[in-house]
Amino acid sequence: MTNIAILGSGRVGGALAAAFAAAGHAVTLGSRDVAAASAAWDGKPVAVAEPAAAIASAQVVVNATPGDSSVVRLGALRDALAGKILVDVANATEHGPDGMPGGLVYPGSSLAEHLQEALPDTRVVKTLNTMVFTVMVDPNSLKSTPTAFLSGDDADAKATVRELLGDLGWPADQVEDLGGVATARAPEAIMLIVPSIFRNHGMIPFALTVAR
């Protein structure tokens, strides 16, 4: 059992919190509005706390906050995040006029790299950002086999995250280790195709995959 803190109580954070709790992990949902997050929760029991308190007892922290503000939000928690593994599932995009994701906030770089720079004592691992949130916790829900990518500088941290992905239902052969944290630039850029996919097919679950 791993103590996991999920930062962000939206659809992504909620789905991951419920799935990790169902897999037997101790989960704390970190929210700036504890009362509202507690009242809205209707899944398997999890703890709800302010972000710093949620992080305190966690070994692994998941960043499910809005990617365009993640660096500021998590940078304020730098001391609390020291020594932790940070699983970054967010995408940093501008807000398009139609409500769809616009351009990348960090063109030529990545959110994961900026988080690693802002949190030098934290081991950042990028994963699960190339899919709709429902696929994160149910990879077998698609007709085609999806791929979960890993990017990060620390091999041990990536090994831990790979095990946690297994608990979400991801087989080992569907997890692709791309290399260091700088390799997160490629999977983060997939967000540029999302508006076209949604316009063509509606808000359907989908994921990027490597066909072999």
Image (tube, rainbow, N blue to C red):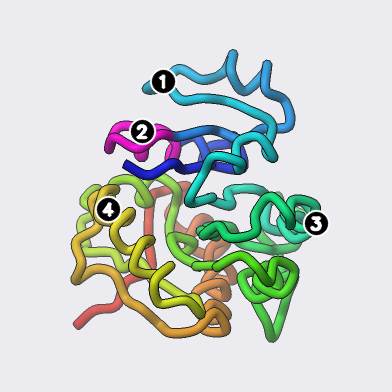
**Which residue is most to the top?**
39
Label 2 with label 1: CB-CB less than 8 Å: yes
Residue closest to the eye, 199 or 16: 16
Marks 4, 1: nearer the viewer: 1
Name the residue type under label 3: Val
Q: Is residue 95 visible?
A: no
Residue position marked by numbered label 1 in the rendering:
45
Q: Position of residue 104 (x, y in %)?
A: 70, 71
How far is disc 3 from disc 1 in space, using C-alphas? 29 Å
> Tag 3 or tag 2, which sits nearer the N-term?
2
In magenta, the rendered stretch is 15-26
Q: Identify the mark nearer the N-term, 3 or 1.
A: 1
| Secondary-structure class at tag 1 | loop
Looking at the picture, how far across and down is residue 173, in whole percent?
19, 71
Residue at 40% from the left image edge and 48% from the top image edge = 204
Taking the image as shown, residue 138 lies to the left or right of residue 3, namely: left
Q: Circle 4 is placed at which residue position?
A: 139
Residue under label 3: 72
Query: Mark 4 falls on what kind of element?
Result: helix
**Label 2 vs label 3: CA separation?**
28 Å
Going by the image, does 26 lie left or right of 194? left
Do callouts 2 and 3 mark residues in contact (Cβ within 8 Å)? no
Identify which residue is drawn at 69% across, 86% down. 108
Q: Earlier in the sequence, mark 2 or mark 4?
A: 2
Identify the mark nearer the N-term, 4 or 1: 1
Residue at the image position 26 percent from the left and 48 percent from the top:
167
- Does label 3 or label 4 sit earlier along the sequence? 3
Front label number (3 vs 4): 3
Classify 64 as above or below 52: below
- Is residue 24 found inside the magenta-colored segment of the image? yes
Q: Would you call the spot at circle 3 few (<14 residues within 10 Å), some (14-19), or many (20 or more)? A: few
Badge 2 amino acid: Ala
